[in-house]
Image: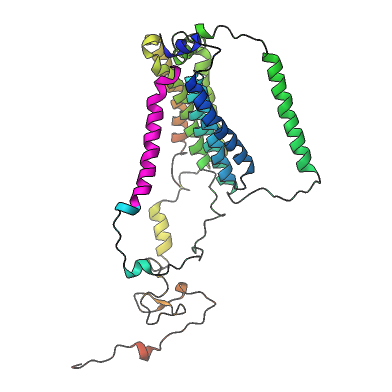
Amino acid sequence: MTLATEVLAAAGQVGTGEKVVFFILAPLAVVGALGMVIARNAVHSALWLVLTMLSLGVFYIVQTGPFIGMVQIIVYTGAIMMLFLFVLMLVGRDASDSVIETLRGQKVAAIILGVGLAGLLGFGVYEATRGIVPVGLEGANAAGNVQGIAKLLFTKYVWVFEVTSALLITAAVGAMLLAHRERAAGERVGQVAMMKDRFRPGNYPGPKPGPGVFANSTSVATPAKLPDGTPAERSISPILPTRELTAAEIANKPTEGK
Amino acid sequence: MSLSAYVPIVGLFALAGAFGLFSVAAAPFIGPRRFNKAKLDAYECGIEPTPQPVGGGRFPVKFYLTAMLFIVFDIEIIFLYPWAVSFNMLGVFGFVEMLLFIGTVFVAYAYVWRRGGLDWD
């Protein structure tokens, strides 16, 4: 007897393990959902959503739907979350919503309507499913949930499965079309060309000096010295007056015997 | 009973969490402490690093292609999972089906690759 059938034999009653998992993860899922709505930072919002989605995935697994649970974790917390975050980074993670209410009473109306909609939907689902006894699940899950799905997917729905690959091609081609800039063969600038471009005019090829390098003074207004001895203008802020020892002061002092 | 198959996974999570907590908690006690002058120096911070990221750290849109390719192969994994679990049951027919599927998905990859979508520039 497999795992699934054992559970289904006891359908209707909730096991202790399931209860424990539910009462730990359900509050976490709700906290995640609330955090997603409340968080000001969009990236934090997305991370809260990860918590909710992971909890939902575990719920599915606990309710003997390991396939949908794994799909939830792999696709939603993996791919979809990645897309969310990608769009956030594309738009700029500093872009946060405005907290100023421009329409008076909008917040209150939104809360009332939102709660009303949730109540309506919940009641609708409750009414539609009240007293209905699900049948056929034992048969479908007889050899295990994942095996049952595999059997259907690779026999009855094999055509749909194969056509899905065409859908994936469409996704890749669409992404190419949207995001890829076609370059002609001669347009591509290689590393060698970029390097020549940069150094042909005679730029100093080393790293740019930091303030105070080779300095005779600890003042931030003292420019760094390039290896050839000239002051590096880039090393200090342009608004600071340059304070420097004169050439005579910094010249090597003669020592004995010289 | 029903969830006993997942007990090892829960145990693994608990072990991972315990390891993290233990590492953080134990570090102040067993870690070496060697102070020197530089460590006790005041660290000056607060100045924005001079080359600011272009556009405030926004991603270039070319990464969308990478993201989409990741999703394509993610979906492929979703199909590989039930296939791998019931590989013995499906036999040669299932194997050929999956080869066809992977072959077709590879067309998308080859398309992106040959058109230069994977080049870094």
Identify the image quadrant of the C terminus of chain A: bottom left
Q: State which region is magenta.
A: B1-27
State the residue lying farthest toward the front.
A16
Image position of B3 with respect to A207: above or below:
above
Image position of A73 with respect to B86: above or below:
below
Image position of B102 with respect to A110: above or below:
above
Residue B120, how many percent across, how many down?
Answer: 44, 45
Q: Is residue B30 left or right of residue B60?
A: left
Residue that appears at 50% across and 37% down: B67
- Residue B10 on the magenta span: yes
State the residue lying farthest toward the left.
A257
For residue A169, say whether it is visible.
no
Image position of A215 with respect to A209: above or below:
below
- Residue A228 on the magenta span: no
Residue A211, how many percent across, how many down?
Answer: 42, 73
Foreground of the two, A143 or A204: A143
Residue that appears at 55% across and 50% down: B58
Q: Where on the picture, by quarter, is residue A45? A: top right
State the residue lying farthest toward the right.
A104
Foreground of the two, A62 or B72: A62
Residue A212, how many percent across, how many down?
Answer: 40, 75
Task: Indicate the colouring scheme.
Answer: rainbow
Foreground of the two, A20 or A192: A20
For residue B5, say whether it is visible.
yes
Please name the predominant secondary structure of the magenta segment in the image. Answer: helix
Q: Count the numbered circles shown.
A: 0
Foreground of the two, B31 or A189: B31
Residue B65, how many percent across, how many down?
Answer: 51, 38
Q: Is residue A133 left or right of residue B48?
A: right
Identify the image quadrant of the N terminus of chain A: top left
